[in-house]
Image (cartoon, helix red, strand yellow):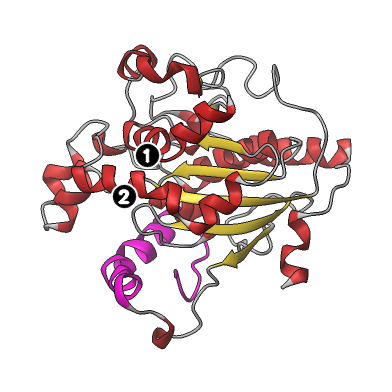
Amino acid sequence: ARELAEPCMRSAVISRQQGVALLLVALNLASGVGAMTVGLAPAVGTASAPSLNIAGKCVYFVRHGQAEHNIMFESNRPAEGRVLLDPALSPLGRDQAAALGKDSLIKEALAQPNPLLIVSPLRRTMQTAIIGLGPWAREQGQKIVLMPDLQETGEVPCDTGSPLKVVEDMFQDDRDVLDFENVGKDWEKKVALNKDTGAALLGRLERFLVWLRPRSEQTVVIVAHHNVFLALLKVSFLNCEVRKFSLDCNAPAARLDTTPIEGGWTALEPLLSTAEEDLVGRSSEQAAAYSSHNFNKMKYWGLRAPERFR
């Protein structure tokens, strides 16, 4: 257990050569899909990010609570769900978000020194973060950083965010805990690295990691989406599920055939299952309901699929 957790506790300097190489990988992945800066503020991640490089981080991933489109998909009405633009949380989703503060992993994360809170700028993820993490953030004077590169992968309305001005107006009462620095004018446009292709997806996830790896914070909480986590971690998340991973910041950039461990990710809690018998209750239901979706998405993106997604 100590060996698994060790990347969360040690620090080192990433060489300039490696940093340049990572950026070049992202640029190569983006070849043919447009400029790297679409959807981001001009100086993303550079104005206020601490410069100390860290070799290992503990990252707590949270999928958003149940949203309006999830209800449609779960009731076998996917066409109705897809046309909902930037859907909000359902009443159940709001309850799930409110329960985050009692989650043992979230309590553990927020007890660490100076945790970094990051959220996708879609409505459902922002609502989840504000309801679940907002009270702590206000009490601590902490900001929740909006990160466009973590937006959901699809190009349909339900996976598309709202324009920046709409988001600002929608969450005007929460501006005290929200950091919009990284959100550019056209962040929600499904072009360039926001396209739903394997190359574009890996490109923007690597762009996000190039921003994250050098930061001084060793504890990170990320609130984002099912398919983002599916591509990054090869794990299928329940609504408002929390999972803890270590990130080795010295690992090479992901390729289409990279496994999560090769990309620097190690599951800490819960561990991934090794057999069907390990899955019970909601976890078993999730594995059955999402199995075809998960394998189809991995095939569509051209990514290497794991044997098990939970």
Q: At 41% across and 49% down in the image, what residue appears? A: 100
Q: Nearer the viewer, residue 116 or 187?
A: 116
Q: Is residue 146 visible?
A: no
Residue 282 shown left or right of residue 211 in the figure: left
Q: Position of residue 182 (x, y in %)?
A: 55, 21
Give yes or no for contact between labels 1 and 2 (Cβ–Cβ under 8 Å).
yes
- Left or right of residue 142, residue 10 in this image: right
Please provide percent x and percent y for residue 294: 37, 63
**Dot 2: what SS?**
helix
Q: Nearer the viewer, residue 301 or 48?
A: 48
- Residue placed at 69% from the left, 49% from the top? 253
Residue at 74 percent across and 52 percent down: it is: 252
Q: Quadrant of the N terminus?
A: bottom right
Q: What amino acid type is highlighted by mark number 2?
A: Gln
**Which secondary structure lies at badge 1?**
helix
Q: Where 40 sits versus 30, above or below?
A: above
The span picked out in magenta is: 281-310
Percent coordinates x, y for residue 132 in the rendering: 41, 41
Q: Amino acid at mark 1?
A: Thr
Quarter of the image where the C terminus is located: bottom left
Identify residue for label 1.
128
Give the mark, 1 or 2, whose residue is nearer the N terminus: 2
Q: Please identify the quarter of the rendering in which residue 293 is found.
A: bottom left
**Crowd class of label 1 (few under 14; some 14 to 19; many from 20; radius 10 Å):** many
Give the spatial CA distance, label 1 vs label 2: 8 Å
Q: Which residue is mark 2?
A: 96
